[in-house]
């Protein structure tokens, strides 16, 4: 009897173990199903007066009429922990609220509607997977740190109605190599592009207010033309950047403290006749600065008050009269601006003929009688034949590589200007 009882007890014990194992598997499966159900479940709520949000399967949709609510770094939006991957804001919503998507590191796609007027402070800051975004032409304001720390952001189209770019708006956007600033922009605030990956930037002459440290630590930035509308180069605008050439247009009168501090790659700068003051440290540690192209004469240089710790500016070679008249119809460009007369050239909106990059010679009468307004000759072209651009009544500019052999009658019957680059 005792043996049978022990055997029965062993069988029960073994059966109990199997039941426990099966129970654990069943509960685990049930948990997975519940999690899956929760993830697939549609969640919704309000995010402003008359504005609602709905989340389902990775996509967050904002709908309604009016402005989104304002959130903070501590009190984030209700969807912050849901793993949002795509945001769709529908027509009727007029703003992206402050901190609305701050730190949504999985966000990869954003669709914004026409009618949206502002992207508030830190709206998309820290969205490290966001690679591109287009702001509709109704947007007039990009707030402070709106896209700060979006390290994957490589392409952004700004609104043609944009007026103001906030502090740190694109700071630390390390993948952003270029950006077009629309003519509508009048204000760029401090640190707006600090630490970004910018290599080049175009700014219009409508900008009248610029903060400090705007391009600080832009280690890829090589060339920039300062807007003619800006009378001052603010404090530490380009400090520690890799800019190599700076063109300051007529109208600039003050270079403020530290403006080009530690720009170790800066080799040349173009100074206008209007310049009267360079404040201390403006060119401190610009170790490779060798050439100054000054619009005035050697005597006129004496009116410029140069502060302390600008030794490299003093010791560089000064080239005088750099803004004298160019030979008629011939200009030598640096970043779209003639290095002699400082005239700016813009070919946007024109009918452009871009000749093939592998072209080495342009034959006689090759483009005679065409309706092009601009012809761009590639860098590898060494010879342009007789009457190549003859009888082109609409032709305004021919962009040429330095050193190309140009037939004397190449532009017969046209009044186009030659722009060497």
Image (spheres, grey):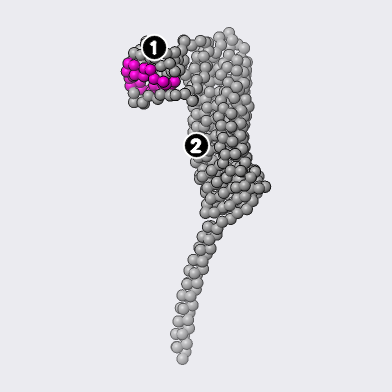
Q: Which residues are magenta?
A: 360-384
Residue 33 in view: yes
Q: Position of residue 92 (x, y in %)?
A: 61, 43
The mark that comes first in sequence, 1 or 2, is 2
What residue is rendered at 45% in x and 88% in y? 4
Check if residue 4 falls in the magenta segment. Answer: no
What residue is rendered at 62% in x and 16% in y? 276
- Which of the numbered marks, if any, corresponds to residue 91? none
Check if residue 374 falls in the magenta segment. Answer: yes
- Which of the numbered marks, if any, corresponds to residue 412? 1
Tell me the SS state at disc 2.
Answer: strand
Query: Which residue is label 2 attached to?
Result: 155
Q: Position of residue 346 (x, y in %)?
A: 50, 22
Would you place residue 126 above or below residue 285 in this image? below
Furthest residue in direction top, as rendered: 299
What residue is rendered at 34% in x and 23% in y? 359
Number of other residues with Cα within 10 Å of mark 2, as a class: few under 14, some 14 to 19, many 20 or more: some
């Amino acid at each position: 009897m005792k043996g049978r009882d022990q055997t029965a007890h062993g069988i029960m014990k073994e059966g109990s173990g199997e039941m426990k194992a099966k129970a654990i598997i069943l509960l685990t499966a049930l948990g997975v199903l519940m999690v899956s159900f929760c993830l697939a479940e549609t969640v919704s709520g309000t995010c402003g007066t008359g504005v609602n949000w709905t989340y389902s399967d990775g996509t967050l949709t904002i709908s309604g009429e009016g402005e989104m609510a304002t959130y903070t770094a501590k009190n984030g939006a209700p969807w912050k922990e849901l793993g949002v991957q795509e945001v769709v804001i529908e027509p009727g919503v007029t703003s992206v609220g402050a901190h609305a998507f701050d730190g949504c590191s999985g966000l990869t796609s954003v669709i914004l509607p026409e009618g949206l007027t502002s992207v508030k402070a830190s709206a998309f800051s820290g969205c490290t997977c966001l690679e591109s975004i287009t702001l509709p032409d109704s947007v007039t304001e990009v707030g402070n740190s709106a896209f700060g720390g979006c390290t994957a952001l490589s392409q952004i189209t700004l609104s043609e109605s944009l007026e103001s770019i906030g502090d740190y708006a694109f700071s630390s956007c390390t993948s952003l190599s270029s950006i077009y600033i629309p003519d509508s922009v009048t204000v760029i605030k401090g640190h707006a592009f600090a630490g970004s990956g910018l290599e080049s930037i175009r700014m219009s002459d409508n900008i009248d207010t610029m903060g400090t440290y705007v391009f600080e630590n832009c280690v890829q930035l090589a060339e920039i033309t300062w807007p003619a509308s800006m009378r001052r180069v603010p404090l530490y605008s380009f400090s520690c950047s890799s800019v190599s050439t700076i063109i300051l247009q007529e109208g600039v009168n003050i270079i403020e403290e530290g403006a080009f501090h530690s720009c170790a790659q800066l080799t040349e700068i173009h100074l206008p006749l209007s310049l009267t003051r360079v404040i201390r440290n403006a060119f401190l540690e610009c170790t490779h600065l060798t050439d100054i192209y000054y619009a005035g004469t050697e005597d006129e240089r004496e009116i410029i008050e140069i502060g302390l710790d600008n030794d490299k500016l003093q010791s560089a070679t000064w080239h005088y009269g750099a803004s004298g008249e160019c030979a008629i119809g011939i200009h030598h460009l640096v970043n779209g601006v003639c290095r002699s007369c400082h005239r700016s050239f813009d070919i946007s909106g024109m009918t452009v003929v871009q000749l093939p990059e592998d072209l080495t010679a342009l034959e006689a009468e090759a483009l005679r009688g065409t309706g092009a307004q601009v012809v761009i000759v590639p860098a590898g072209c060494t010879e342009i034949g007789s009457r190549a651009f003859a009888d082109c009544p609409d032709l305004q500019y021919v962009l040429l590589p330095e050193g190309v052999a140009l037939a004397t009658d190449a532009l017969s019957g046209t009044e186009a200007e030659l722009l060497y680059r």
